[in-house]
Amino acid sequence: MYGTSTNFAINKLNATTRFLQLPQPENKVQVTYVWIDGTGQELRAKSRTLDFVPTKVEDLPVWNYDGSSTYQSQGENSDVFLHPVAIFNDPFRLMPNKLVMCETYKHDRTPTESNYRKVAEEVMIRAADQKPWFGIEQEYSLLDTDGIPFGWPKEGLPSPQGPYYCGVGSDKAYGRPIVEAHYRACLYAGINISGENAEVMPSQWEFQVGPCKGISIGDHLWMARFLLHRVAEEFGILVTFDPKPVPGNWNGAGAHCNFSTEAMRKDNDGILEIEKAISKLSKKHKRHIMVYDTNEGMDNKRRLTGKHETSSLDNFSSGVANRGASIRIPRHCVDERKGYLEDRRPASNCDPYRVAEVMVRTVCLDE
């Protein structure tokens, strides 16, 4: 299964595999630094050779890159600095090689405009005693290189939505080899991926990351996104996190955020804490909408229409097992009187650092 990209005029995949099977010197390790560029949603990466195997981020040197080519600086003062924050195994080059998630800093050592992790981590430290946990359900769509959803007819549309969600069969599941490869790559890397499934729109899929404690939800989700792009690259297919990739009567794509504190997870009284959290969230609806996509709510405006399993952009709502509400309380959490809430408002292209930060500010810190 390959796209129509000219990259596959030669057998690229087999050629790459051949060279990756060459012996690697024992004293040389390839480390790929990954970061968020100035768009706030695209990822960049470059690699370096180290003469030791890093086992923690403190082992890794600070590095730099040309920020004038990533929308983060001017050419006359272009150095931007990479500070490693999370380390993973490399599923492409295999162990002992590593992938590293990084924060980005300007020449004066202040965070770049797209570095939301630093502030989010400070917020997590302040709320650490409440033990916030996160899980994010990341939806995305696969596209051919011409921009048409993968597997869709080049003229016209596929059959209407209905048979595709968790579907099985070549006429229902478009792109499963990419999904399976990504799932295994995440497990190998050490990402806390908890599942995957086909979504409502054909060629749309979802993977879930979590539960993760505090700031690690952003580290793991961003690296999982990087792996998805890299795996799809091997197949000549594109990945989009556009919240509404196809206009009309098709589902959009979200990044539903499951959230709990230690108090919410306690027997019997947990449900009362969940209800308190929802009350707090209802008073901060507009602020959350502003940070739940990368365009101050404008991308979500195309998605949160009150249709296609979404709530209204303008009005807050909540309900038990209600996928048309802003906040859903899963049925089993009501039955068990403890658990978590699901915020269904974040768009698929949200920054998980920002989502986690605003959730903790509202629910845990009353800010």
Image (spheres, rainbow, N blue to C red):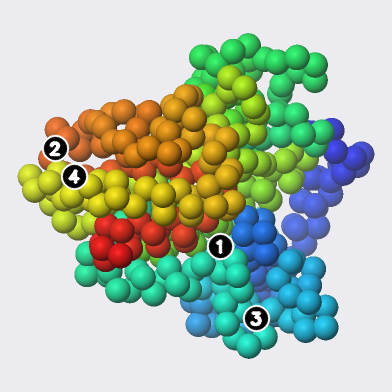
Of callouts 3 and 2, the N-terminal one: 3
Kindly state the secondary structure of the residue where label 1 is placed: strand
Q: Residue at x 54, y 39 (%)?
A: 301
Q: Are marks 3 and 4 in contact (CB under 8 Å)?
A: no
Mark in the foreground, 3 or 1: 3
Q: Position of residue 24 (x, y in %)?
A: 72, 69
Mark in the foreground, 1 or 4: 4
Q: Is residue 152 left or right of residue 305?
A: right
Q: Position of residue 218 (x, y in %)?
A: 47, 60
Rendered position, 269 above or below 330: below
Q: Quadrant of the N terminus?
A: top right
Q: CA distance from mark 3 to mark 4?
A: 42 Å
Q: Which residue is mark 3?
A: 106
Q: CA distance from mark 2 to mark 4?
A: 14 Å
Of callouts 1 and 2, the N-terminal one: 1
Q: Quick one: label 1, few (<14), some, or many (20+) residues within 10 Å?
A: many
Q: CA distance from mark 3 to mark 2?
A: 48 Å
Tell me which amino acid carries mark 4: Glu
User: For residue 89, which numbered disc appears in the image?
Assistant: 1
Tell me which amino acid carries mark 1: Asn
Q: Which residue is mark 2?
A: 336
Of callouts 3 and 4, the N-terminal one: 3
